[in-house]
Amino acid sequence: MYCIKCGVKLADSEKTCPLCNTTVFHPDLIQGEGESVFPSKKYPTAKDNTYLVQMFLSFAIALAIIIVLLCDWRIFGTVTWSGYVIGALVLGYVSVILPSWFKRANSVIFVPIDFCAVGVYLLYISLHTNGGWFLSFVFPLVGGLGVLITAFVALLKYLKKGKLYVVGGFFIALGGFMLLIEYMANITFEVGKFHGWSLYPLVSLAMLGLFLIFVAIYRPAREIMERKFFF
Ligand SMILES: [Zn+2]
């Protein structure tokens, strides 16, 4: 006998399906008192394991931070190089381990968090090395890229249709962003004249973006692409 809902094999004694809980009814069979074909004992699932790994990694990183801090402090009497190491450890934790604590980590929330973490880390380095390149270079670069990628991820996630337009638009925006990067780099590092290296990625990204938008608009092209790449 099989469950009418999920199709699992049932013993004659089963009154409800052990898998989906559907009531078992078979008019020709008198329900016996035999044993279930399924073990009643529940086994631990793989999820318990990830929790342990998360705990272990969290403690390992916390321990590493303490050791690094103590070493630096014992040798120099203050925070010198350890700040960079700790920053990198925190950055790794925020970007890799933190999202795994959530059952369904929303990328629209975690992408901007990652960019903020990168920004704060670079601000720290800039301040400690008297770089003076944060406000005019890193801030517009990381901030702009963060906004761009967050918008891209959000649109892909919540938009039902027109994803090809989003991807195409993203490539074009990314190309435009290259110009901004070169401009900001010139101002910050006083390169002087505009060399125009950013025009190469700009042109290639814009062409790729326009091609995708063309495919999205022009139906026959889309059908060929769909058949070729299965999307
Ligand atoms: Zn069932």
Image (spheres, rainbow, N blue to C red):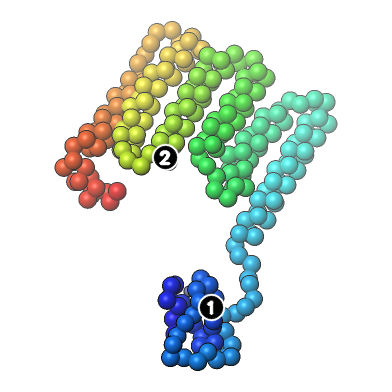
* Cβ atoms at labels 1 and 2 below 8 Å apart: no
Q: Position of residue 121 (x, y in %)?
A: 62, 27
Cα distance between the residues tagged 1 and 2:
39 Å
In this view, 46 is above or below 140: below
Amino acid type of the residue tagged 1 in the rendering: Thr
Identify which amino acid the numbered label 2 is placed on.
Tyr
Callout 1 environment at 10 Å: few (<14), some (14 to 19), or many (20+)?
A: some
Residue 118, can we see it? Answer: no
**Residue appearing at x 24%, y 47% in the figure:** 226
Question: Is the shortest distance between ligand 1 and the CB of mark 1 under 8 Å?
Answer: no
Say above or below: 22 vs 98.
below
Instruction: Judge depth for marks 1 and 2 and give the one in front.
Output: 1
Instruction: Kindly state the secondary structure of the residue where label 1 is placed.
Output: loop
Q: Quadrant of the N terminus?
A: bottom left
Provide residue 84's location: percent of width, then percent of height. 67, 29
Q: Which mark is residue 63?
A: none
Most extreme residue toward the front is 27
- Element marked by disc 2: helix
Q: Nearer the viewer, residue 66 or 210?
A: 210
Badge 2 local density, few (<14 within 10 Å), some, or many (20+)?
A: few
Q: Where does label 2 land, which residue?
A: 158
Q: Position of residue 145 (x, y in %)?
A: 46, 27
Q: Residue at x 35, y 16 (%)?
A: 196
Q: Which residue is mark 1?
A: 16
Measured as percent of width and height from the top left, residue 32 is found at: 55, 91
Upstream in sequence: badge 1 or badge 2: 1
Query: What residue sits 66% from the left and 36% below the top?
Result: 90
For image coordinates 33% across by 30% down, the residue present is 169
Q: Nearer the viewer, residue 225 or 4?
A: 4
